[in-house]
């Protein structure tokens, strides 16, 4: 079985569990649950939940015990996309080849659907913590909360927004990438590692992997915004230029940005290889992320 097939199988597993953790579209008021599910099942790669699962497995844990947290982080990621797509933010009409939530349900319901997914995520994780009564699960929830919060993804989003149309330096750009994108990957890997039973030094290593892969992932995304097509990406291209955003691709050029992605990925892979064969899937996932075309 190829790596892409294995990744797809894991994504399908996430979708199966997501059905268990999301309210039915038949609940009242139906429109909010329909809107939540519309965005969650819009065809994402499920990279963050897969990272939770595989980090748990890499440190000897049972991946099934990590599924509430894997699904929760995907709900949080989806809420962030819904809000990021709004006219007040990126203001694009399509994501993954489909009309965005606010174009289907209106801005008011889209905002509420994002809010609902964020709170559903924490309800799912809190229930798991109560049921397991194990500090590892509480630490996993904390890792995800920190990755998504005001010192993580939200901070990155804020600096990204206030930097539009301005000349920014590399330090500011790095802050945006490390918080807007990498913080959630750190949270995913750390959450899985905590559930798997990783010790303090192993947690430190997996956090470094999350930072490297997250920043490299975002730089690659910026490169694709310049070099790819709408058909391949499933979303508009040149959106950074349209929104007057500085990226690694514009600051250093595409070739130098690609070399930075390669260097960061190689460092991450070396750390993962040091964790043994149980981290093999994470190694292949890192390779896949830097070579992806969408």
Image: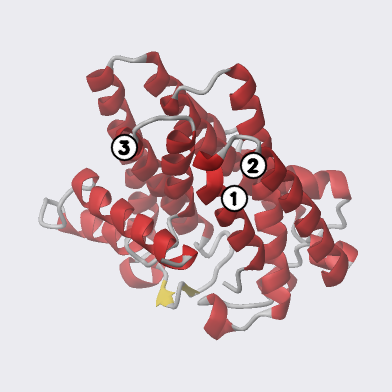
Give left or right: position of 256 versus 76.
right
Residue annotated with mark 2: 273
Residue 293 is left or right of residue 216, and the answer is left
Earlier-in-chain disc, 2 versus 3: 3
Up the image or down, 14 lies above or below 86; here it is above
Identify residue for label 3: 68
Q: Residue at x 35, y 38 (%)?
A: 63
| 294 sits to left or right of 55 | right
Tags 1 and 3 in contact by the CB under 8 Å rule?
A: no
The image shows residue 225 at horizontal and vertical percentages of 67, 73
Residue shown at 89% from the left, 50% from the top = 169
Q: How is the image coloured?
A: secondary structure
Alpha-carbon neighbours of circle 2 within 10 Å: few (<14), some, or many (≥20)?
A: some
| Mark 3 Cα shell of 10 Å, populated few (<14), some (14-19), many (≥20) | many
223 over 65 or under it: above or below = below
Asked if labels 1 and 2 touch by Cβ distance under 8 angstroms, the answer is: yes
**Residue tagged 1:** 283
Q: Of the residues under marks 2 and 1, which one precedes in the sequence?
A: 2
N-term-proximal mark, 1 vs 3: 3
Q: Foreground: 206 or 152? A: 206
> Split into 4 quadrants, where in the image is the N terminus?
bottom left
């Amino acid at each position: 079985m190829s790596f892409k097939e294995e990744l797809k199988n894991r994504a399908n597993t996430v979708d199966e569990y997501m059905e268990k953790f999301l309210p039915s579209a038949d609940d009242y008021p139906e429109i909010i649950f329909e809107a939540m599910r519309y965005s969650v099942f819009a065809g994402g790669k499920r990279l963050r939940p897969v990272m939770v699962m595989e980090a748990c497995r890499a440190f000897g844990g049972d991946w099934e015990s990590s599924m509430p947290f894997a699904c929760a982080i995907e709900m949080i990621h989806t809420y962030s996309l819904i809000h990021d797509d709004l006219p007040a933010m990126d203001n694009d009409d399509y994501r993954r080849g489909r009309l965005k939530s606010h174009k289907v349900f209106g801005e008011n319901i889209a905002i509420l659907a994002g809010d609902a997914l964020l709170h559903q995520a924490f309800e799912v994780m809190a229930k798991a913590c109560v049921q397991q009564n194990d500090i590892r699960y509480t630490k996993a929830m904390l890792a995800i909360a920190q990755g998504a919060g005001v010192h993580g993804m939200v901070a990155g989003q804020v600096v990204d927004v206030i930097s539009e149309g301005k000349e920014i330096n590399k330090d500011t750009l790095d802050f945006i990438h490390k918080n807007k994108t990498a913080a959630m990957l750190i949270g995913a890997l750390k959450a899985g590692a905590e559930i798997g039973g990783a010790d303090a030094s192993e947690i430190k290593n997996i956090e470094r992997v999350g930072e490297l892969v997250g920043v490299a992932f975002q730089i690659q995304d910026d490169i694709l915004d310049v070099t790819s097509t709408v058909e391949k990406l499933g979303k508009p291209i040149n959106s950074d230029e349209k929104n007057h955003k500085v990226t690694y691709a514009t600051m250093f050029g595409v070739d130098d940005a690609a070399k930075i992605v390669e260097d960061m990925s190689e460092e991450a892979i070396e750390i993962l290889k040091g964790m043994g064969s149980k981290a093999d899937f994470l190694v292949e996932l890192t390779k896949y992320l830097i070579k992806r075309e969408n």
